[in-house]
Image: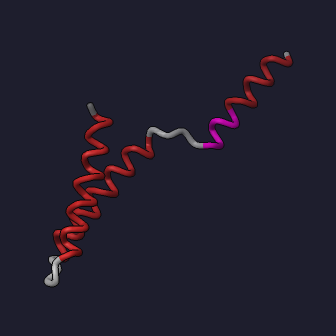
Amino acid sequence: MMKYLNYILIIVGAFVAMYAKAGANQNQYILICGIVLLMIGVYRISRNIPSKRDVENDNNDDKKLENE
C-alpha cells in the first residue's frame, strides 16, 4: 500500500505543478506545493532502491566467500 502512496504523490504533485504552471496568473504557492509532493514521492521511492556501490560490494563479498 505504501508503494502506491508514493506513485500517487508523484502523479498528484506533477498534476498540481502543471495546473499551477498552465494558468496565466500563476499561484506560486500551489506550484511549490505540487513540486514538494512530487519530490517527496520521488525521494520515498529512491530510498528503496539499493546503491550500485552496495550491490557491487555484496557481489565482491560473495566471491570472497567462494574462494575461501
Q: Residue at x 23, y 63 (%)?
A: 34
Q: Is residue 53 magenta?
A: yes
Frontmost residue, 66 versus 22? 22
Q: Is residue 17 above or below residue 39?
A: below
Q: From the viewer's perspective, is 56 left or right of 49?
A: right
Q: Where on the picture, by quarter, is residue 12?
A: bottom left
Left or right of 58: which side holds 20? left
**Does residue 54 appear to the left or right of 6 in the view shown?**
right
Residue located at (81% from left, 17% from top): 66
Image height of 18 relative to 24, above or below: above
Q: Is residue 51 left or right of residue 19?
A: right
Residue 60 vs 45, above or below: the answer is: above
Residue 40: % across, % down: 32, 53
Q: Nearer the viewer, residue 33 or 16?
A: 16
Please provide percent x and percent y for residue 19.
19, 68
Residue at position x 17%, y 72% from top? Answer: 29
Residue furthest to the right: 67
The answer to which image quadrant residue 50 occupies is top right
Residue at (63, 38) in percent of width and height? 54
The secondary structure that most of the magenta stretch takes on is: helix
Q: Quadrant of the N terminus?
A: top left
Colouring scheme applied when the structure was drawn: secondary structure
- Find residue 11 and report its horizontal and vertical position in percent: 27, 52
Q: Where are the magenta residues, as a range?
A: 52-57
Indicate whether 13 appears above or below 57.
below
The number of callouts visible is 0
Residue 3 lies in magenta, yes or no?
no
- Viewport quadrant of the C terminus: top right
Q: How far from the left and from the top, in percent, is residue 20?
A: 19, 72
- The residue at the far bottom in this view is 24
